Image (cartoon, rainbow, N blue to C red):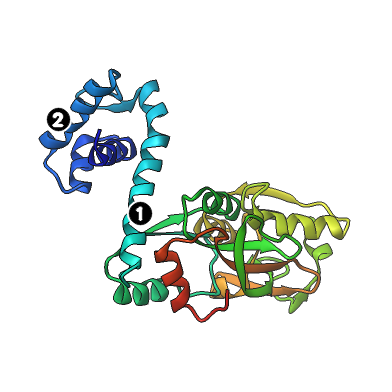
Amino acid sequence: MELQQFRYVLAVARTRNFTRAAEECFVVQSALSHQIKSLEHELGVQLFTRTSRRVELTEEGAAFLPAARASLDSAERAAADASASIGQVRGTLRVGIIPTVTALDVPAALGAFHRTHPGVRVVLNSGGSDDFIAAIAAGGLDIALLGMAEKTVPARVRTVELSRERLVAVLGSGHRLAGRKRLRLADLADETFADFPEGTPGRTQSDLAFKAAGLRREVAFESMSTDFTLGMIRQGLAIALLPPAFVTPGPNLRTIKVDDGPTRIEYLAWSDFNPSPAARAFLDLLPVEG
């Protein structure tokens, strides 16, 4: 078995398409298909079910993926460590970004990193803070931007605090409270909210604040997409609590301070055990102290 075969299998599993997988791996489709068939013959199992229109993992294929991915990751890390020993940074930098990053200009930071270390491949993932913390601890991510409630300290990772800010109420311009300069949570208790899914850190900070104030609220629209949330607000269907730096007030949106609103802390997080050379190089370029 060869690592290149593992790479081909992972690409097909991700794209569910042999043609796109071949393009992603910079190889002709016939060669990729041949290598996967050769691996299946060696293993004595079929990894994919193929039709003219669909490609699906078999049960055996799904069982094969975790070890194949771990083998590739280990090989890449070994190569990166060897390059780092002679002052070269190579490999892959995997970065997780929550939807509401405000404390760091991520494109600018990645641009500076790429110019300094062009041999490193950068992979971005969008998602939630809890998933990113677990991925860093498991070795699936190198760096992540997290947003957490004030009293929630990320565990199993190293962190540096980038910012803390009190969330503001975001309302449509036609809302009955749009003319107010300041609000309290009690003023918002009877409103319909759009928020992140229940149990996610982005939602928890607001849930805890209402609970501490002895108030209940209705969250009718749940989404990880902040564009969706702002769309619901513009249509007058909901309000939300969001970081002030994330929202630009305009003709259809108003932001209002909430005196007893939740405080959100944004962290930069990375592995607390043997971070990769790419991760260490990225941290060295940032104006933060780890």
Residue at 67% from the left image edge and 65% from the top image edge: 175
Most foreground residue, 11 or 276: 276
Question: Disc 1 marks which residue?
Answer: 78
Q: Position of residue 270 (x, y in %)?
A: 53, 62
Residue at 30% from the left image edge and 39% from the top image edge: 15
Residue at 12% from the left image edge and 36% from the top image edge: 31
Q: Position of residue 218 (x, y in %)?
A: 74, 49
Looking at the rendered structure, the kind of residue marked 1 is Ala
Residue at 46% from the left image edge and 76% from the top image edge: 284
Looking at the rendered structure, the kind of residue marked 2 is His
Which label sits on residue 34?
2
Q: In the figure, residue 91 lies in which quadrant?
A: bottom left
The Cα atoms of the two marked residues, 1 and 2, are separated by: 28 Å
Where the N terminus falls, by quadrant?
Answer: top left
Q: Do the residues labelled 1 and 2 touch (CB within 8 Å)?
A: no
Tell me the SS state at disc 1.
Answer: helix
Asked if residue 242 lies left or right of residue 31, the reply is right
